[in-house]
Image (cartoon, rainbow, N blue to C red):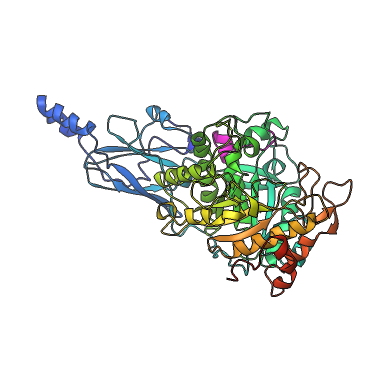
Amino acid sequence: MASPKTGFSTKDTKSTKAEGFCFLGALRVLRGWELLLFLFLLTSVPADAAITNVTATRTTVTLRGNAAGIPLRLFALAPWENPSVLSNRLPLATLAAKKAMHIDLARRADGFDRIYSGFVLCALDSTKPLGPVRYVERFDGVALWDEPFPQPASKKGLQVQMVDDALALGVKHAALNLYLGGWFRGLDGKDVLQWTADGETYRFNRQAVEGLDRQVKPLSDAGVVVNLIVLAGPTGDRVIDQWLVHPNYSPTAPNKLAAFNTSTEAGFRHLRALFEFLGARYSRPDRQFGRVVGFIMSNEVNSHWDWSNMGSATMEQFADDYLRATRLAWTALQPFAPNSRVYLSLEHHWNIGYRTKEPDKSFAARPFLEYMNARSKEGGDFPWHVAFHPYPENLFEPRFWNDKTATPDAASKRVTFKNLPVLTEFFRRADLGYSGKPRRIILSEQGFHTPKGADGEAVQAAAYAYAYRLVEREPGIDSFILHRHVDHSHEGGLLLGLWANKPGSIADPDRKKPIYEVFKTADTAEWRKAFEPSLKVAGLEKWPGDE
C-alpha cells in the first residue's frame, strides 16, 4: 500500500463512483476452452482503451475515456513517480467491460490533492499502462478569483531595476527575477510567512517576499503587466538545495542556475507550495500586494547546461522534466489565477543548438517546441506559452539586420529580430495551438549592445527603434521586454542598458544613453520625432509599416 502522504491509497470505496463489476462469479462457472477464451479476451486490449479527459472541480476529479469493452484497472501516480511503481500498488478502481468510461474520484484523499495526480489504465492482469499518464487538463468552478488577462495599451516592456524610472518611461510590461533560494526557509527559520498544503507547512523568507511586493505593487497599480522569471540554483544550504535544485545538477554549471527539482517528493511539494503561494498572494482582487499574471519557467532552457542545469541530458530527457515543472506551475495557479500564463523560456537558436558539438548540453528550439507540444497533448494539454529571446546572432553586434544565420525560412539556424515571422508563422500551425488558438509569445529578454566608437550609442538606439517597429507588426507577439535597464559590469562586457552605469559600480545608474528617449517615446505619438535619427543608422528609408 502506498504511503498515506502520496494520496494514492489502494482503496477508495467511499470516493469512487465507477461502473461496478462482478466477473469473479463468472470465472467459477466457466470451464476449459471457455475459460481460456475469456482470459484471452481480457488480455487482448484494443488500442483505443484510453483516458481522454480529466476535469477537476472543488470536490472531485472526473475521468472520461474509452473503456474498449473490456475490464480495466485504474491507477494513480504521484507526479514524481513513473509507472514502474504500479507493480506494487493496488488500483483505485476496476472497471466493468463497457465502451465508455466515466469515473468520479474525491479530489482529496489521504492528505493529497489529486489535481496533481497522473492517471493510467491497465489491463486486468497487467500493470503496463495503456497509453500515456493523463493529468487534469480542465478546471471547473475551482478558482477563488477569475479575472481576465490584462490587455495593455502597447508592447513596450522592460526588465525593471528601478521601479520609479520604469513608470516614468511608461512601460506596459515588466519582468522581475525571483530566485527560489532566497525565498525558502528551513524548519527553524525566523521572520517567515507560512503556507500550508496538504497539511504541511512551508516557510518563506518574509524579507524576500516583501521585497518583491515593493516592486510588483507600484508596477501593477499603474497597469503594468508583471511577469516573474522563476529561477533555481544552489544556495549552499544543503537542506534547501535538496528541495530546490535538480538532483542531476552539475557543480560545474557555468552560471550556477539549475533546473527545478520535481523528480523527488520534497522537491515537487516545495515548488508546488511556491506557486500556490504566488497565486494566492498576487491574484487578490484587492491588490494588497499587487498583481502578477505571467510566470516564466527558468531561463533559456534550450541552452540548459548554461542556464537551467540538470547535468548532461538529451532534449527528450530535459523536456520531460521541464514539462512536469511547467504543468505543476499551471496547476498550482488554477485555484487562484486561472487566466495567468506560464511560459517556456528559449534563446534564439532555432534549428541548431548553442553548443553544437555537445548535444547533451543544448538543443534547438524548434524540435523542442514540437516535442513539448506532443507530450503536453498526450498527457492532457494545458495552455503553456513561449517567452522567446531573439538577440542578434552576435550579442556584441547590435546591427541585427546584418545577421547571416537568421534567414526567412523554416530551416533558419536562428530567429532574431531580422526574421521574427519565422517564429510567429511557426505558432500559426493548428497542431501547435491550444483549444483552437495559437499559443502566445512574449519577447521576455533581449537587448542591444553599445559597441565601441563614436557612433556606438546611436547604433544601439537605432537597433531598438527598428526592432520595436518590427514587433509592432506581429500580432502574435504580446510584448517586447528589453534587457537591461542599466549597464551591468558582470555581463561579460555587454553594455545593454538604457542607462550607463557608474564607473566602478556593478549596475548603479550614471547617465541616460540615446536609447532612453527612443524607448520612452516608442509607444507614444512622439515616436517618429525620436526615431528619426535612427533611420539612416539602420540603413532604412522608412520604417516597417510605412509602406
Can the viewer see residue 113?
no
**Is any part of residue 268 visible from this angle?**
yes
Query: Could you say where residue 477 lies in the image, as x and y percent from the top left?
Result: 56, 60
Residue 325: percent from left, percent from top: 54, 42
Q: Residue furthest bottom?
A: 525
* Side of 58 where 491 appears, left or right: right
- Above or below, 195 against 281 in this view is above
- At 48% from the left edge and 42% from the top edge, which residue is drawn? 367
Residue placed farthest to the top in the image? Answer: 32
* The C terminus sits in image quarter: bottom right
Is 102 left, or right, of 242 in this rendering? left
Q: In which quarter of the image is the N terminus?
A: top left
Along the line of sight, which residue is nearer the eye, 120 or 449?
Answer: 449
Which segment did they paint magenta?
254-269
Between 340 and 197, the residue placed more toward the observer is 340
Residue in front for this viewpoint, 15 or 426? 426
Q: Where residue 503 sits in the image (x, y, percent)?
A: 89, 48
- Report if residue 204 lies within the magenta region: no
Determine the image quadrant of residue 355. Answer: top right
Question: Measuring 76% from the left and 41% from the top, which residue is drawn there?
Answer: 492
Q: How many marks?
A: 0
* Magenta stretch: helix, strand or loop mostly: loop
Residue appearing at x 47%, y 44% in the figure:
372
- Where is residue 41? Give x, y as percent: 18, 33
Q: Which of 422 and 122 is in front in this view?
A: 422
Q: Is residue 225 above or below residue 135?
A: below
